């Protein structure tokens, strides 16, 4: 389960609900191994603990379930400690810049001086403390566990050791010791946006730095069928058409939409290049492994218009993912049936078509309808 920020996590939930809709017997909670990277680490931690994608998506749509929603203040918790540290270090950066200029007044450029000053800036805007606390409290509930060794399913979470530049896999025999919530928060620490996560005497950043999906981790633990959900796909824009912008001024090129969209498109390009290279190598090295890759279409502007960290877009992205992936599953049903059938998984196109027909007619997807009854049950218990 790959990364992709807040919208990436919402995409995961839409996809997982679409996958559940095509089988009356199998569930995405039945997989033997879960590999989570970045936003996918939080979702994988929940799935491995038996929390259904229906519960997760409904909680974040504001419905009452046994799963609390994650708040914007938890996902975007300011890194106050980092700010204090930078205030202490900033004067030293100024002194360093002055010393450098005094020693080489004719060869020191403005960029050199700014570089020295930049060392005193905070490492990030936010911290993953809120994410760690949310996952910890969620998994401390009865019937769940925040310990890798205590859950029935194999859970593996990737992160990057910033000092050694190596990938680490929490939950594996060789991985560092950590709780699930600590590992998930380390895996979601996007550089510059989030402060690095210290576990023991090591410092970790986002697991997607080495690979946005880490498919090889699943294969290394014996997986023969892999469902890879990769939310990060670059948007291929036809420059004959204009792009909407937040300023109200139309743009013909992505570069005209400003820093957030340039950064997101750059990140998407690099992530997809990693996935394509991984799949090429794995296909040749492991021809006995079946891999189903689920990702947004490259021309899907609905996925592109949202910032990767757009908290308010969660519901729209999840619903859009459900609908587009459900259509893809129906369209390519023979291919999916053949691959999944080799592993004893039976699916039904009729179930998906039934749900899609309801959506077309203006009804909510079935998992939303089911929740209304769940909410009523919770309300009845509260009143009783």
Image (tube, rainbow, N blue to C red):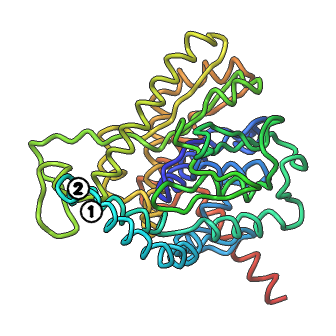
Q: Tell me if residue 178 can be seen.
A: yes
The dot on residue 28 is none
User: Is 319 left, or right, of 151 in this rendering?
Assistant: left
State the image coordinates of residue 195 (x, y, percent, origin top left): 55, 62
**Residue 25 point in image, percent of width and height:** 75, 39
Above or below for 376 versus 147: below
Upstream in the sequence, badge 2 or badge 1? Answer: 1
Q: Looking at the image, which is closer to me, 262 or 235?
A: 262
The alpha-carbon separation of the residues under discs 2 and 1 comes to 6 Å
Q: For the N terminus, which image quadrant?
A: top right
Q: Residues within 10 Å of mark 1 (few under 14, many from 20)?
A: some
Residue hosting label 2: 108
Image marks 2 and 1: residues in contact by CB distance under 8 Å: yes
The image shows residue 40 at horizontal and vertical percentages of 60, 48
- The secondary element bearing badge 2 is classed as loop
Dividing the picture into quarters, in which one does residue 296 lie?
top left
User: Which x, y percent locates residue 21?
Assistant: 61, 45
Q: Which residue is mark 1?
A: 101
179 to 300, vertically: above or below: below
Q: Residue at x 58, y 50 (%)?
A: 38
Label 1 SS: helix
| Residue at 82% in and 42% down | 153
């Amino acid at each position: 389960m790959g990364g992709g920020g807040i919208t990436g996590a919402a995409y995961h939930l839409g996809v997982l609900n679409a996958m559940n809709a095509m089988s009356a017997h199998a569930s995405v909670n039945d997989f033997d191994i879960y590999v989570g990277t970045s936003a996918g680490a939080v979702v994988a931690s929940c799935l491995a603990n038996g929390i259904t994608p229906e519960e997760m998506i409904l909680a974040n749509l504001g419905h009452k379930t046994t799963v609390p929603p994650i708040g914007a203040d938890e996902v975007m918790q300011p890194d106050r400690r980092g700010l204090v540290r930078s205030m202490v270090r900033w004067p030293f950066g100024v002194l360093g810049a002055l010393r450098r200029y005094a020693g080489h007044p004719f060869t020191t450029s403005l960029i050199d001086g700014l570089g020295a000053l930049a060392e005193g800036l905070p490492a990030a805007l936010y911290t993953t403390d809120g994410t760690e606390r949310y996952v910890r409290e969620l998994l401390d509930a009865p019937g769940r566990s925040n310990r890798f060794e205590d859950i029935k399913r194999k859970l593996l979470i990737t992160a990057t050791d910033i000092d050694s530049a190596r990938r680490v896999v929490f939950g594996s025999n060789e991985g560092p010791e950590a709780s699930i919530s600590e590992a998930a928060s380390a895996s979601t620490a996007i550089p510059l946006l989030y402060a690095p996560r210290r576990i023991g005497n090591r410092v970790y950043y986002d697991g997607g730095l080495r690979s946005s999906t880490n498919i090889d981790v699943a294969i290394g633990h014996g997986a023969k069928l892999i469902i890879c959900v990769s939310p990060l796909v670059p948007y291929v824009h036809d420059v004959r058409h204009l792009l909407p912008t937040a300023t109200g001024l139309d743009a013909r090129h992505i570069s005209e939409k400003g820093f957030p969209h340039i950064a997101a498109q750059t990140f998407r390009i690099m992530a997809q290049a990693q996935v394509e290279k991984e799949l090429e190598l794995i296909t040749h090295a492991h021809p006995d492994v079946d891999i189903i890759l689920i990702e947004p279409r490259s021309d899907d502007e609905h996925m592109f218009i949202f910032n990767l960290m757009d908290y308010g877009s969660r519901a729209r992205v999840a619903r859009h993912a459900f609908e587009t992936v459900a259509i893809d599953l129906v369209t390519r049903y023979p291919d999916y049936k053949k691959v999944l059938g080799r592993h004893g998984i039976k699916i039904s196109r009729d179930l998906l078509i039934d749900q899609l027909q309801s959506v077309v007619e203006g009804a909510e997807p079935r998992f939303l309808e089911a929740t209304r009854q769940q909410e009523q049950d919770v309300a009845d218990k509260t009143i009783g």
